[in-house]
Amino acid sequence: MRNLLVVFLTPIGIHSYPIGTEQTRFHRSIVTQTRRSAALRIKLRRHALLLPDGDEPPSKININPTYLSLATLETIYWYYLAPGIDPASRWFAPSDGELISKLLDPTIIFTQPGYAFSSLLLNCFLILPMVWALLLLLEEKDNQVISPLPFCLAGFFVGGGALIPYMIFRQTSSKVDLEQNRYGGFLKLFEPDSLGPKLICFLLFLVGSTFVYEVSNNSLQGEWEVFVDRLHHSQFISLALLDFTLLSCTVADPIADDAKRRGYTSNQDDGDLRMFLLPLVGPVVWILERPPLP
């Protein structure tokens, strides 16, 4: 077959042998058709690589000025305004590196007082970025300018430092199709009546139980005083609290779009979504109680 293709496509295969006029016309028609088919396949392949499954490209890139301002504010706070900044590197000071290592050590946070609220804040970034990912990955096939996947993955490590910049370019999504979504199989695990939402609720229960156990090692007031003092001296804790606040407030946008897609609200009626904006708990309740996709 490979040899026949070479004969068809090589001019020598046409002119080197004395063949009749009819045979030459027939031969040339096959060569022309073969070349056209190959060009069409290349064109379609290029289109599929750029826009899988025949999606149409977005008409233009829209920049959301609100999220651009929030991302700029967070960057300025990180490098210039946060307490405890290391002047040499503008990165976390050595004391913050030591604090992070202690917060990741269960033998310390479960036995020593003074880490309850700091540990709770860190554990929130196990849940909140997960909720964001479930909302944003639904829109993967809906003509987004940038894929949300890298930002969702980075959100587990830097929180709003990845998710807020993505929201600058995100386009409002009115409909989704899990069958066309490349992550549809995974996202179906977190649809209503599936196991996924219950696992997130269980994770929330573990975070709350861990906090209660840690507080039992000290008084609630004592733990709060330690946290407030650390907030005034630690770049990591102050930035993490700012990050948590931003993500808890701005999650209203993807939740509102998800509510409209599922018929919970309409374009004319935003409904009452306030109960789902309670920090940490509200977004988890939305994932658990939201209606199924139509």
Image (cartoon, rainbow, N blue to C red):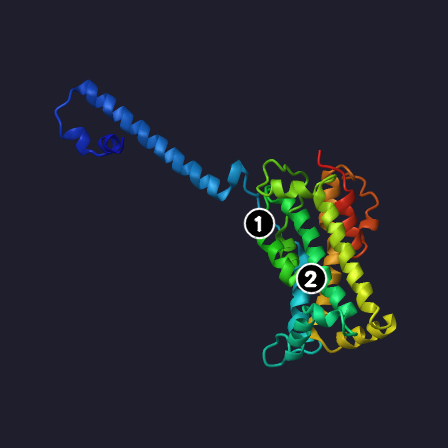
Residue 262: x %, y % from top left: 74, 38
Q: Are marks 1 and 2 in contact (CB under 8 Å)?
A: no
Q: Give the position of the N terminus as an image quadrant.
A: top left
Q: What is the three-letter code of the residue carrying label 1?
A: Ser
Name the residue carrying label 1. Answer: 147
Residue 181: x %, y % from top left: 59, 40
Q: Quadrant of residue 163?
A: bottom right
Q: What is the three-letter code of the residue carrying label 2?
A: Leu
Question: Which residue is at a point 12% across and 24% down the rendered structure image?
Answer: 18
Name the residue carrying label 2. Answer: 70
Question: Which residue is at a point 39% across and 33% down the rendered structure image?
Answer: 40
Q: Eyeballing the image, is 180 above or below 196? A: above
Residue 186: x %, y % from top left: 62, 43
Mark 1, mark 2: which one is toward the viewer? Answer: 1
**Front-most of residues 230 and 163:** 230
Residue 242 shows up from this direction:
no
Q: Quadrant of residue 26?
A: top left
Q: Give the position of the C terminus as an image quadrant.
A: top right
Residue 152 shows up from this direction:
yes
85 to the left or right of 9: right
